[in-house]
Amino acid sequence: MVPASYYLILSAILFTLGAVGVLIRRNALVMFMSVEMMLNAVNLTLITYSRFLENVDGQVFVLLVMAVAAAEVAVGLAIVISFVRHKDTTDVDEMNLLKG
Amino acid sequence: MEMVIFFILAAIAVAAGVGVIAQRSAVRSALFLLVNFCCLAGLYILLNAQFVAMVQVIVYAGAIVVLFLFVVMLLGMERAEETPDPRRYQWIAGSLLGLLLLAGLIWALIPTAAETVQTVTRSDDVRQIGAALLTDFAIPFELTSVVLLVAIIGTVVLAKKKLEG
């Protein structure tokens, strides 16, 4: 039996990797992938607690998170596509239309 | 044995996570993301959450990564390398902040882990999830359908070409 803390440390590492990816990458697509990784790290935490507290509610939450993640990816990629039509790049530093 | 499987899956998941953020090509990042998701599905099975593991493979690996790959190739950005960052310190600052975040997360998560108990495994997960979704979580469950509907409409509105006039 693997202790719960191992799963929690793994989930913390994956969440950190996602956060660092958002911070250091400038390609909007890769940033989205990093956000997905962070969502997955949180899912791992929820499943771990669901397992060790013997309560199925955590798994229900994971299903809801997955639905929201799917919606987020669809909308986010649509935004990227419409941005690329304007500027022909996925670099977030070029996304400055709202600066006035 | 369980420990060995855990460490193999965890090592591959972390390596794939590093691959996602370190690769210059977006296609390779997406493929590393796929590896990461599959490893997490394996960990879910290890945690006795078989149903969620299957949903993970179908929704994340099957739908989301394919959507990513589809968009990367549709945009023709797969060979567009990022130009060298003029602000090199961003890399270092990001990594340092990441280490700080990691320390904070571990500090926050570990004390709670000691209180948890381990008991016998269950086998009727799917039934319990279904019951929870239709009783305690009925309203969030229904709201999810609204979220998906809004996402569908929003995606179509955002991605269609502007009508002239």
Image (spheres, coloured by chain):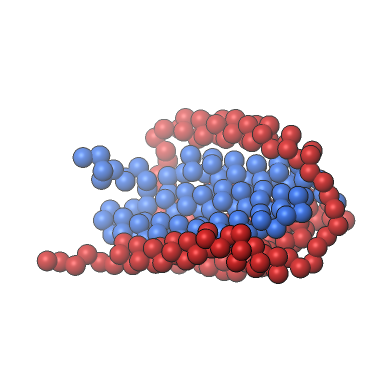
Chain colours: A blue, B red
Instruction: Say above or below: A46 vs B144.
Output: above
From the top left corner, tell me how far across and down residue B28 is, in percent: 54, 57
Whether residue B44 sits left or right of residue B146 in the image: it is right
Front in this rendered view, residue B46 or B113: B113
> In the displayed structure, does residue A6 sit left or right of residue B98?
right
Q: Which residue appears at 69% of the width and 37% of the height?
A: B109
Placement of the N terminus of chain B among the 4 image quadrants: bottom right
Q: Is residue B98 above or below residue B39?
A: above
Taking depth in this image into account, of B51 and A92 the one nearest to the observer is B51
When asked about the image quadrant of residue B150, the answer is bottom left
Q: Position of residue B77 (x, y in %)?
A: 40, 58
Can you name the residue that lies furthest to the right here? B1
In the shown orientation, is residue B90 left or right of residue B54?
left
Residue located at (37% from left, 48% from top): A91
Q: Position of residue B87 (x, y in %)?
A: 41, 32
Furthest residue toward front: B135
Is residue B25 among what the camera can see?
Answer: no
| Residue A46 in view, yes or no | yes
For the C terminus of chain B, the quadrant is bottom left
Residue B56 in the image, given as x and y percentages of width and height: 62, 63
Looking at the image, which residue is at 52% across and 60% down?
A: B139
Q: How many marks?
A: 0
Please name the residue shown 65% across and 68% down the image. B130
